[in-house]
Image (cartoon, helix red, strand yellow):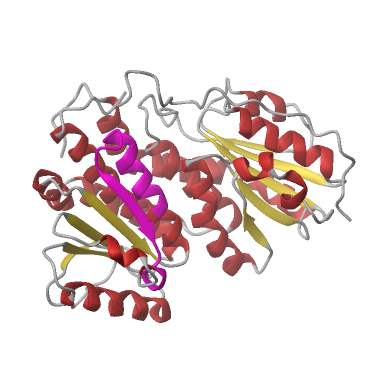
């Protein structure tokens, strides 16, 4: 899809089907150790954390893992843990803290694990990272009862925006806590290849159109993907194109005011038959709403809504929404990259001034002196 071989971000987007297959093989190779860790902590609360895009991985995975495991799984951003740790860990219960981190070097990522150790009597860590030289990897790989998993080679994205690091860490989490067969990973990888080739025509067309704002909508796990998609657009266009996210039901409660002639609306359609009804209702409403905004449905199954453009992934019908988030993300990443290139920006470094950095800088971590209040 992309002819810009010198753009690392483009390469990192296009490598995703391959690294998804590699991630599946990595988890399979570590299955014995993974299952032993999970068995030792079978009754623990699971908290999924990370900063920025890494936090959105948790937001996508948590509803799916709660449903698949029947366990309590919460998504709490590392930034929220650091700023209000006694609220995040108000209950002193056995906890598994799952930290997602591309580099493992952001100050909040390290501080979140330290605060968990400080406030909780019984806490163990799962580190899912792309960098074996990062602080999280180094600190936790030496701890006897922590589980450290490294995504495949090449996923420590060199570009500014997280792309293959995001999707590979998400896939690892899903495979760890809700194992699925090799055929599911193969289907996702094949769908990703289609999204980059035949399916890449639509994102390229939309990028060339030059919308001033893009709204991403999704329900359940796909709300987290909508949030990540909006961020990807903001990052790669240096904020020159407005990205917004919401759920289909929430969008009616005021945010729908954003619609105008320069707005593109993308609805990530749920695979859940019940939830899907609400997505289709909103799609029908959106195409009937006055204005020249364009409406796109991204779906794993055919969608029949007159007036909406439908982007249908082949071969993944029957997979759950958290898994579908991987090839769905390719659509959003491709659109964001296309917009960035159209604007004449440098996607690998859209902020040459250094105002926004690949690894967050300037954060002061304040010491928590108060005694733990959890009970």
Q: Is residue 220 left or right of residue 259?
A: right
Q: Is residue 25 visible?
A: no
Which quadrant would residue 309 be assigned to in this image?
Answer: bottom left
Name the spot of residue 82 as percent of width and height, x first.
Answer: 68, 39
Report the residue at 34% width, 53% height from top.
244
In the rendered image of this protein, does residue 93 appear above or below residue 107?
Answer: below
Q: How many marks?
A: 0
In the rendered image of this protein, does residue 358 appear above or below residue 315?
Answer: above
Name the spot of residue 312 as percent of width and height, x first.
Answer: 22, 64
Q: Is residue 191 left or right of residue 174?
A: left
In the rendered image of this protein, does residue 80 appear above or below residue 287?
Answer: above
Please state, as top left, top right, bottom left or bottom right, where the N terminus lies in the image. top left
Report the residue at 36% width, 70% height from top.
248
Is 289 magenta? The answer is: no
Report the residue at 63% width, 65% height from top.
69
Name the spot of residue 375 as percent of width and height, x first.
Answer: 89, 56
Report the residue at 69% width, 37% height from top.
112
Is 229 magenta? The answer is: yes
Which quadrant would residue 275 be assigned to in this image?
Answer: bottom left
Q: Nearer the viewer, residue 299 or 154?
A: 299
Q: Is residue 129 visible?
A: yes
Which span is picked out in magenta? Answer: 227-250
Q: Nearer the viewer, residue 300 or 297?
A: 297
Q: Is residue 307 left or right of residue 270?
A: left
Name the spot of residue 122 as percent of width and height, x first.
Answer: 85, 47
Q: Is residue 56 left or right of residue 136?
A: left
């Amino acid at each position: 899809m992309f002819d810009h071989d010198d753009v690392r971000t483009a390469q990192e987007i296009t490598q995703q089907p391959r690294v998804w297959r590699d991630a599946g093989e990595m988890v399979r190779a570590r299955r014995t150790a993974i299952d032993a860790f999970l068995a030792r902590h079978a009754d623990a609360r699971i908290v999924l954390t990370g900063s920025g895009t890494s936090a959105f991985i948790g937001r996508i995975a948590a509803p799916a893992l709660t449903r698949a495991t029947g366990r309590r799984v919460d998504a709490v951003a590392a930034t929220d843990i650091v700023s209000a740790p006694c609220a995040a860990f108000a209950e002193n219960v056995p906890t598994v803290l799952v930290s997602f981190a591309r580099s493992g070097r952001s100050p909040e990522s390290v501080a979140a694990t330290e605060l968990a150790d400080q406030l909780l009597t019984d806490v163990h860590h799962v580190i899912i990272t792309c960098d074996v030289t990062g602080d999280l990897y180094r600190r936790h790989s030496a701890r006897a009862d922590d589980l450290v998993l490294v995504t495949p080679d090449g996923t420590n994205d060199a570009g500014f925006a997280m792309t293959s690091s995001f999707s590979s860490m998400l896939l690892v989490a899903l495979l760890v806590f809700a194992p699925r067969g090799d055929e599911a990973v193969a289907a996702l990888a094949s769908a990703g290849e289609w999204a980059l080739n035949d399916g890449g025509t639509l994102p390229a067309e939309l990028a060339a159109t030059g919308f001033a704002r893009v709204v991403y909508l999704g329900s359940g796990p796909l709300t987290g993907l909508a949030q990540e998609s909006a961020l990807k657009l903001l990052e790669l266009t240096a904020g020159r194109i407005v990205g917004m996210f919401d759920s289909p039901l929430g969008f009616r409660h005021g945010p729908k005011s954003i619609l105008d002639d320069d707005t593109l609306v993308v609805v990530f359609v749920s695979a859940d038959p019940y939830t899907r009804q609400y997505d289709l209702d909103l799609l029908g409403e959106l195409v009937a709403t006055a204005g020249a905004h364009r409406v796109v449905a991204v779906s794993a199954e055919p969608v029949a809504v007159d007036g909406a453009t439908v982007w249908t992934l082949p071969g993944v019908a029957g997979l759950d929404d958290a898994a579908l988030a991987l090839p769905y993300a390719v659509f959003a990443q491709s659109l964001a990259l296309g917009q960035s290139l159209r604007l004449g920006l440098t996607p690998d470094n859209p902020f040459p001034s250094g105002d926004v950095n690949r690894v967050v800088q300037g954060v002061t971590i304040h010491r928590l002196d108060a005694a733990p209040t959890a009970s």
